[in-house]
Image (cartoon, rainbow, N blue to C red):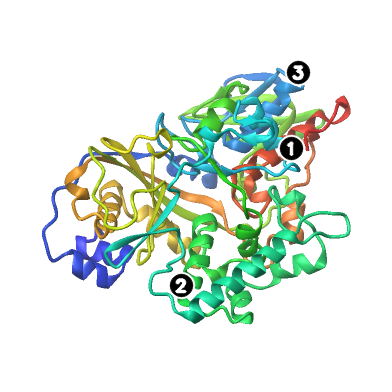
Amino acid sequence: MELNRRDLLAAFLGAPFAAMSCREKPIALPPGELVGASDTIGHRLRGGAFPQPSRWEAREVVIAGGGVAGLSAAWRLANAGMRDVLLFELEPALGGTSRSSASFPWGAHYVVAPSPENRVLLRLLNEMGVMENGQPAEQFLCRDPEERLFYRGRWYEGLYLHAGANHEDLRQLRAFETEIAKWARWRDAKGRRAFDIPVANCSDDAEVTALDRISMGEWMDARGFTSPRLRWLVEYATRDDYGALLDDTSAWAGVFYFAAREERPVITWPEGNGRLVSHLARFAVSKTPWLVANITPTADGVDVIAIRDDEAVGVHAKRVIFAGPQFVARYVIPSRESSNDFTYGSWMVANLSIRERPASTGFPLAWDNVIYDSPSLGYVVSTHQRGIDRGPTVLTYYYALCGNDIRRERERLLSAGRDAWAEVALADLSRAHPELRSLTDRVDVMRWGHAMVRPRPNFVWSEARRRAAQPHRGIHFANTDLSGVALFEEALYHGVRAAEEVLGARGGSSWL
């Protein structure tokens, strides 16, 4: 049943805001459409009934999945001289949650400047001309102002609400920053950082991994971090990267968010990580939109069946890289024991095309713009990196459904169509920009039903996560969920790792 406007806003933005927002009749919604992701096609996997292949072909390697992990695997194989590689992707566009249009993102929109140990990302950025003398070139670093926060009618610099903070608030902020700095400096006996990107570079010392056994909420409680402003900041971080609240996020993942990034600048582009996807896609021979429905190991290789509409093709491959998430693997690879320990959050992304920038009171328009009292994650300005501060632009609005009942949250996401989500985005942002609706020409919406893995307590350093990355009878696995945290860098790492497992006996130096 379709909700009326008041019930819709109450469901997604809260009853008090809905009551206030519905006092005046809104302007009609601008046009737009619901784009990707193909949840109805993907759900065909659960039925298990597919047409038989009309033809078969032979390939050395098949990659199932054209997100960043699959594209990274193709990139690594191509650089090793392996050409007989075919990639299947369910969506019409490659890139997964890093895909973009020509000028704005549909998901991930930045990477953190890599440490010297992140050799794979350094290689990619050097290849793309992003690095100069070992550092990111200035034009690729997020330009100022980078972040601002809206609170009670005014914008403030940064994401911590300093305005009105009392002595205790500020004492707790300093104590939190000291704790994070301690972990950022921490090294184990092998010289490894406690927290680094990718996760594979992190220390597995018991002192560090013990953090995975409690929630971030429990970690903060134990240290007396009770300040509402500090807890808002930290929970904004867990919502932003993991689509989860403090009590549903591993303390290891919560500390990782801050300590692994400390003092590292942000690298970004107008189209977000779609710039990286475009480069990686040059190395892939891909078929889209094709759904890989079945992967079966055989005596001399691996058979793959892919479908599009009522057509099916079969491929006899020597090796397969499965670059999809683990919840899909259980349907596609019946010979392999699957894990139920992987859980995924749901997201909505809306791109609002506006003809002029809305007015702001207080701190000026930034790259990342967040509303303190909103359940959303705010918006990113697509033209910010171009240095264009007037005229038309696109605001990319992010909303993570963070409740602990992940099935219910996914149902909530899919229950709202384009018009409903456009209404939510416009109403939410109108609390900071009352004139925004009249400035908006178009609103397009993307719903991500399984946007990113959630790092729940006892998951990141679990045996289940480690085991899921192990090869299975000629099938190798590559996806960001194998790290327990959903970052571009993690997908890149696992794609290259799986490709190097395939390369195996060929020798040559490793990129990892």
Give the mark nearest the N terminus, 3 or 2: 3
User: Depth-wise, is mark 3 or mark 2 nearer the camera?
Assistant: 2
Secondary structure category for the residue under label 2: helix
Report x, y in % for residue 483. 68, 51
Quadrant where the image shows the C terminus: top right
Q: Classify 10 Å Cα crowding around label 1: few (below 14), some (14-19), many (20 and above).
A: some
In this rendering, position of residue 155 left or right of residue 469: left
Which x, y percent locates residue 329?
64, 45
Mark 2, residue position: 229
**Residue under the point 50% across and 44% down:** 108
Q: Front-most of 175 and 319?
A: 175
Q: Is residue 183 left or right of residue 237?
A: right
**Which residue does the image show at 74% across and 60% down from the upper left?**
185
**In the displayed structure image, the side of residue 89 where residue 429 appears, left or right:** left
- In the figure, is residue 258 to the left or right of 272? right
Residue topped by disc 3: 81
Q: Residue at x 79, y 69 (%)?
A: 207
Query: Label for residue 58?
Result: none
